[in-house]
Image (spheres, rainbow, N blue to C red):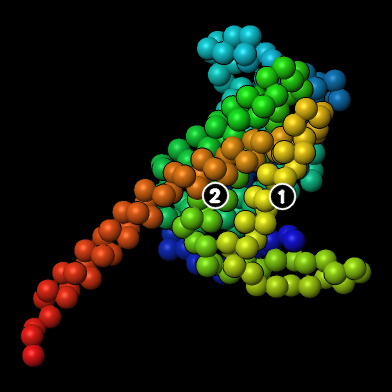
Amino acid sequence: MIPIYDENPTKRFPYLTVTLLVANIAIFGYEITLSSDALQSLFDTWGFTPVAYFSSPFAPTALMTIATAMFLHGGWLHLIGNMLYLWIFGNNIEDRLGPIWFLVLYLGGGAAATIAHALIYPTSDVPLVGASGAIAALLGAYLVLYPRAKVVTVIPVFVFIELAKLPAAFVIGMWFLLQLAQGVGSIGVATGVAWWAHVGGFVIGAVAMLPMIAGSQIKSTARRRTRKRAEPEE
């Protein structure tokens, strides 16, 4: 399944989401101008390498790579997939949270995702790059906030392409289960995908939204009780 857009309108233009899209695309544009050696050097310097991080976890450069790694990508498909998910699901989260808290969720979720990957693979010397962990946090938030929103999804059926409107809970839930299954299967095995970063980011994003949902339900209940008390008796 490949989501292509959601039927969940926003009230405000998602300036920060667009800014993140432009920043990621611009940095990737710079990446493709580099030679293979220069690109590897860029990843080694600004990607997040678990073994290097744990050797000096509080060094400024080590801490910086937690953030800088989110803006590097390993190829066209890596970039396009991440930016597609960012655009589809990020605009609604920015609309709901506002730009400041949206950025906190994006960067905080991405940082948590990176640390989750590092804890599973503490001796890895392969640089972690990509916005996947941060975007996974947005997916977790979207699942909690908009589980019934319809997501238009491409479903390949043999040589045919079908379009289906599916609930976000199904689309995102299936995505998460796939990440979790792949993550469990990758423990102790060298892999080119940071499955546990996806899982970690998703969980952080979902949990972060629970107080908001609880607060909304409490306010809704209070309003209903107030209206009920205000109704005149017959």
Q: Position of residue 17 (x, y in %)?
A: 54, 48
Helix, strand or loop under label 1: helix
Is 144 above or below relative to 112?
below
In the depicted view, which residue is nearer to us: 203 or 109?
203
Q: Is residue 218 something one can see in this rendering? A: yes
Residue 184 appears left or right of 172 = right
Q: Residue at x 77, y 38 (%)?
A: 185
Is 55 above or below relative to 131?
above
In the depicted view, which residue is nearer to us: 78 or 32?
78
Q: Which residue is mark 2?
A: 140
Which mark is nearer the camera, 1 or 2?
A: 1
Q: Which residue is mark 1?
A: 178
Q: Residue at x 37, y 48 (%)?
A: 211
Quadrant where the C terminus lies?
Answer: bottom left
* Neighbours of disc 2 within 10 Å: few (<14), some (14-19), many (20+): many
Helix, strand or loop under label 2: helix
Q: Position of residue 131 (x, y in %)?
A: 64, 38
Q: Residue at x 70, y 66 (%)?
A: 153
The disc at residue 38 is: none
Q: Position of residue 19 (x, y in %)?
A: 55, 44
Q: Position of residue 88 (x, y in %)?
A: 60, 57
- Alpha carbon separation for disc pair 1 and 2: 14 Å
In the depicted view, which residue is nearer to us: 18 or 155?
155
Quadrant where the N terminus lies?
Answer: bottom right
Residue 62 appears left or right of 124 = left
Name of the residue lying farthest toward the right: 159
Number of labels in the image equals: 2
Give the amino acid type for the residue marked by disc 2 in the picture. Answer: Gly
Q: Is residue 134 something one can see in this rendering? A: no
